[in-house]
Amino acid sequence: MTAPAESIVFEGLRKSYGGREVLAGVSAAIRAGEIFAIVGPSGAGKTTILRLLDLLEGVGGGRIAYDGREVHFGDPEALAQRRRMAMIMQNPVMFSATSFDNVAYGLWLRGLDEAEIRGRVFAALDFVGLLEAAGQRSDRLSGGEQQRLAFARAAVLRPKVLFLDEFTANLDPANVRALEEATLRHRAETGCTTVIVTHNLLQAKRLADRVAFLLDGRFVEVSPTHTFFEDPARPETRAFLSGELAF
């Protein structure tokens, strides 16, 4: 599971829904191969950023570039870019099929031969500790196992960029630990650029190289993880971390 990572630069991202501005000019430069966490209060627009970066919807303003190539939602090159990325959501949707078939589906769409598909799928299932569940229907798996299956389904595609949207929310500690370890191992083995949205500040502290704090539609602070938690530059960040920030 190897894939060269891609850098992501976005500048002045804006997005509104129903006349309400959710993002008011968000900018950041995410380095190739880093784990970049986005934290902030509920409704701040964290998931919206991921959806825009994953080209699932168009921006209301601003630009997004991958390895220096600007890409726009709906453009012909957007599909090719999306195939270099993967997203794991809080509540993944599984096909009514076996674990093997769920993980293999994206490879079938890409026209790979059966031998390569089998090898990659079994390796991905083994990576998340689900090799023995290859022939088991996905709806028979626990919630934590389904989320690990979603990780395998993303990783098997060998993405250059991986988006994680609250991917361990409401899971038991054992599955949280398994998924966090999978995230770190995946980055170590592939160099994949990883962008995480999480309410779990300890998770951001454990996984991220840098952390961004989103408030009122903008990044208030973007810092190396140690600095963000131990010596934040902005009073809003300090108030957020201490639980004193009123929303």
Image (cartoon, helix red, strand yellow):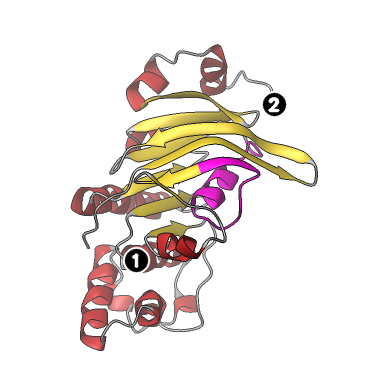
Residue 25 figure quarter: top right
For the residue pair 188 and 70, the one nearer the viewer reads as: 70
Give the residue type at disc 2. Answer: Phe
Asked if 136 appears above or below 39 in the picture, the reply is below
Q: Earlier in the sequence, mark 2 or mark 1?
A: 1
Instruction: Label 2, secondary structure: give it.
Output: loop
Left or right of residue 50: residue 186: left
Q: Residue furthest bottom?
A: 114
Image point (42%, 31%), residue name: 211
Q: Position of residue 95 (x, y in %)?
A: 50, 79
Is residue 59 rendered magenta in the image?
A: yes
Residue drawn at 34 percent across, 46 percent down: 67
> From where the camera sits, is residue 48 visible?
yes
Quadrant location of the C terminus? top right
Q: Which residues are magenta?
A: 42-63
- Residue 43 position in % (x across, y down): 66, 39
Whether residue 93 sits left or right of residue 85 in the image: it is right
Relative image position of residue 54 (x, y in whole percent): 49, 54
Residue 152's tag is 1
For residue 210, which numbered disc appears in the image? Answer: none
Q: Is disc 1 surrounded by few (<14), some (14 to 19) or many (20+) residues within 10 Å?
A: many
Packing grade of label 2 (10 A; few <14, some 14-19, many >=20) is few
Q: Say if 56 sits above or below 65 in the image.
A: below
Q: How many marks?
A: 2
Above or below, 2 against 217 in this view is below
State whether residue 201 appears in this view: no
User: Which quarter of the picture shows residue 204?
Assistant: top left
Q: Given the image, on which type of amino acid does mark 1 rest?
A: Ala
Q: CA distance from mark 2 to mark 1?
A: 36 Å
Q: Which residue is mark 2?
A: 247
